[in-house]
Image (spheres, rainbow, N blue to C red):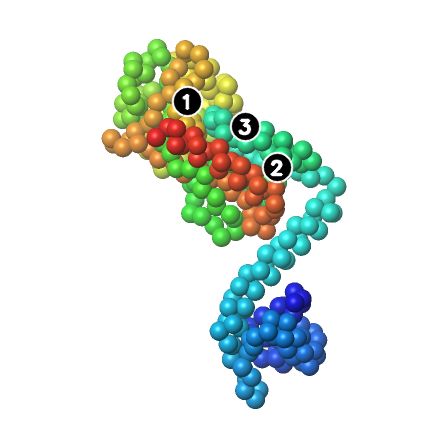
């Protein structure tokens, strides 16, 4: 059985006509008919019941059409990726992540991926949600680890990594550090430290205030390290993107879950990539990250 014969059969079924299929395939009608007969002989069962100029599918034909179409799509994707790998002078993965992410799972995944695929160069950068979205939209990133702030788009693969509580770090000098959680209501007079570039300060502050309900009392740092120094000096509290409750190193601050109106603030964290750039290495990286996030979630429950 040839994949070409499968392609011809699927074209005939979808066109509901041998003639129309031959036009679409740019070959003669007799050639299409001969190839489908050869396919039936190879399988040993009829796929079509021919009635003058029309036809209907046998149960075997229905099955072959449904699953054959899926198989052809996989083969075409396989061929496309093989050609891409053969044409690329340098294999690379351009990966972005949130600039206030502080978990270990991403770093462990990068190390595991590099060990498995040393031929791939990983280019890593960070940014705010909007920074990452723009890099992905403009095809300057292959995939990004981001929080969900928009409705999922059909343009992208929206791979939910985990849903978890939003945590924050606060100085041990602050009396609130003795609580088992931090509430937005109790934090209203304390500055919230956000990590953002000068260009993204307004957008980042608006999201935390308008969507999450934080008080409009923000301090901005350019890096996570700078933000943590502000926390250590008791200048404010720092919301963090993390998948686990591992406490920060040192004794200057503590990490506690954030609550709003008596309920924990939940966040969706996803890997996003464009569907027209869904490569083998992108999908492998996603698989490796999931393997490291799930055990961490199990331990923390």
Element at label 3:
helix
- Which residue is depicted at the point 30% across and 23% down? 181
Residue 138 percent coordinates (x, y):
59, 44
Residue 123 appears left or right of 168: right
Q: Which mark is residue 112?
A: none
Against 247, residue 7 (above or below) is below
Residue 133 appears left or right of 89: left
Q: Quadrant of residue 207?
A: top left
Mark closest to the chain's N terminus, 3 or 1: 3
Residue 84 percent coordinates (x, y):
69, 48
Mark closest to the chain's N terminus, 2 or 1: 2
The quadrant of the rendering that contains the C terminus is top left
Q: Which mark is residue 246?
A: 1
Against 159, residue 70 (above or below) is below
Crowd band around label 3 with a 10 angstrom C-alpha radius: few (<14), some (14–19), many (20+): few
Q: Are marks 3 and 1 in contact (CB under 8 Å)?
A: no
Element at label 1:
loop
Crowd band around label 2 with a 10 angstrom C-alpha radius: few (<14), some (14–19), many (20+): some
- Which residue is depicted at the point 69% across and 36% down? 119
Against 124, residue 15 (above or below) is below
Foreground mark, 2 or 1?
1
- Which residue is depicted at the point 53% across and 73% down? 61
Q: Are marks 2 and 1 in contact (CB under 8 Å)?
A: no
Residue 284 percent coordinates (x, y):
57, 41
Q: Report the residue marked by disc 2.
A: 94
Residue 130 in view in this figure: no
Q: Looking at this view, name the residue that lies furthest to the bottom.
A: 52
Element at label 2:
strand
Foreground mark, 3 or 2?
3
Q: Report the residue marked by disc 3.
A: 107
């Amino acid at each position: 059985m040839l994949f070409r014969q499968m392609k011809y059969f699927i074209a005939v079924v979808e066109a509901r006509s041998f003639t129309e299929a031959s036009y679409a395939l740019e070959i003669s009608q007799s050639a299409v008919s001969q190839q489908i007969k050869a396919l039936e002989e190879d399988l040993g069962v009829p796929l079509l019941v021919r009635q003058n100029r029309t036809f209907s599918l046998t149960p075997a034909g229905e099955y072959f059409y449904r699953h054959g179409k899926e198989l052809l799509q996989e083969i075409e994707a396989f061929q496309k990726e093989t050609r891409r790998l053969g044409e690329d002078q340098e294999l690379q993965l351009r990966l972005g992540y949130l600039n206030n992410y502080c978990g270990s799972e991403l770093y462990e995944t990068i190390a595991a991926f590099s060990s498995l695929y040393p031929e791939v160069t990983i280019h890593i950068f960070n940014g705010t949600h909007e920074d990452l979205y723009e890099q992905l939209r403009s095809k300057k990133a292959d995939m990004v680890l981001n929080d969900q702030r928009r409705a999922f788009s059909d343009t992208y693969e929206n791979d939910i990594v985990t849903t978890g509580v939003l945590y924050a770090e606060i100085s041990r000098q602050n009396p609130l550090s003795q609580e088992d959680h931090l509430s937005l209501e109790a934090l209203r007079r304390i500055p919230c430290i956000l990590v953002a570039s000068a260009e993204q300060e307004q957008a980042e502050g608006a999201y935390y205030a308008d969507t999450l309900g934080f008080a409009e009392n923000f301090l901005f740092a350019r890096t996570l390290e700078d933000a943590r120094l502000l926390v250590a000096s008791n200048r404010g509290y720092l919301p963090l993107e993390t998948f686990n409750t591992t406490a920060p190193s040192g004794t200057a601050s503590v990490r506690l879950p954030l609550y709003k109106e008596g309920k924990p603030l939940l966040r969706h964290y996803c890997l996003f990539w464009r569907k027209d750039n869904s490569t083998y290495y992108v999908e492998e990286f996603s698989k490796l990250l999931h393997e490291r996030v799930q055990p961490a979630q199990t331990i923390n429950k």
